[in-house]
Amino acid sequence: MAGKYLAFLSKLQIIMDRPLVIINSAMSADGKISSVERKQVRISGRKDMDRVKLLRAESDAVMVGVGTVLADDPGLRVKSPDLKKMRTNRGLSETPLRVVVDSRARTPQEAEVLGEGCILAVSKAAPEERIDLLREKCEIVVAGDGRVDLRELLSILHKKGVSRLMVEGGATLNWSLIEAGLVDEISVYLGPMIIGGEEAPTLVDGPGFCDDYPKLELLSIEALDEGALLRWRVLS
């Protein structure tokens, strides 16, 4: 089944003007990806963290929303010497492109994600003074009017050579991508814990669907650490 699915992805990528998009996340048994404080909660075990590092290294770009940057300040770089070597042996840079979706350019100038190899995607509504400051730290891409147009952004990334895009959150970005029909696969580590909280973020937030719910096809499920890894294909 895995072989057929990989073949399907390869054919799909050829006809799409965008990368293959994989949402990867970890959530508690009750579906929360963070607490009501919206601070990083360690859900994954060691084996899942190793899986995530490999998935990141195998991707052409990694994307997060500005909310994740403000809450967790992730670097999104490949740190393992072995994984860096794996990439350079393939003629790639040591770490994938890092993409931040930030409609109004709220990313702090000192954010870890910034630097060479970072793309900040903003909308036309972003203040020019913020764009000028951040342009010193990263490449700026403008897509969309009041909010970043994700379809346009993915097309731009595709033209830059991004064939495989890993999305690492957060819940609002996940919603926007799924709502726009721009996600091909979802991989979720289900951790052995309860977080709770009516206002705690889930895997997908946003307004929510009232009908025409996106359908998923289960690709695999396996025990991992003390939890389980689930992989779905998003059906069009």
Image (cartoon, rainbow, N blue to C red):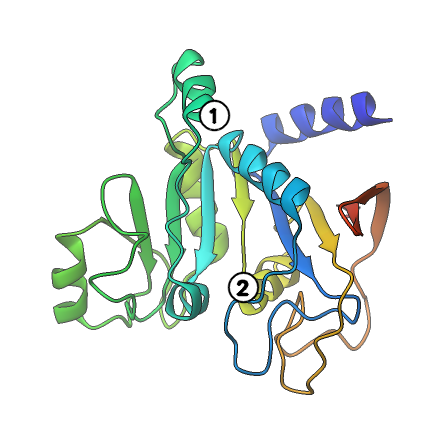
Residue pictured at 74% horizontal, 73% vertical:
209
- List x then y, in percent, for residue 211: 82, 73
Q: Which mark is residue 83?
A: 1
Q: Nearer the viewer, residue 206 or 231?
A: 231
Q: How far apart are the alpha carbons under marks 2 and 1?
A: 25 Å
Q: Horizontally, is 171 left or right of 103 in the view?
A: right
Give the structural element (helix, strand or loop) at label 2.
loop
Q: Which mark is residue 170?
A: 2
Q: Is residue 19 visible?
A: no
Q: Nearer the viewer, residue 66 or 195?
A: 195
Residue pictured at 60% horizontal, 44% vertical:
49
Q: Nearer the viewer, mark 2 or mark 1?
A: 1
The amino acid type, in three-letter code, at marker 1 is Leu
The amino acid type, in three-letter code, at marker 2 is Gly
- List x then y, in percent, for residue 69: 39, 63
Q: Nearer the viewer, residue 67 or 222?
A: 222
Q: Horizontally, is 83 left or right of 209 in the view?
A: left
- List x then y, in percent, for residue 167: 54, 50
Q: Are marks 2 and 1 in contact (CB under 8 Å)?
A: no
Residue pictured at 40% horizontal, 65% vertical:
66
Of the image marks 2 and 1, the number of the one nearer the N terminus: 1
In the image, residue 174 above or below residue 201: above
Write down the quadrant of residue 108 in the picture. bottom left
- List x then y, in percent, for residue 24: 63, 49
Residue pictured at 67% horizontal, 40% vertical:
47
In the image, residue 152 above or below residue 200: above
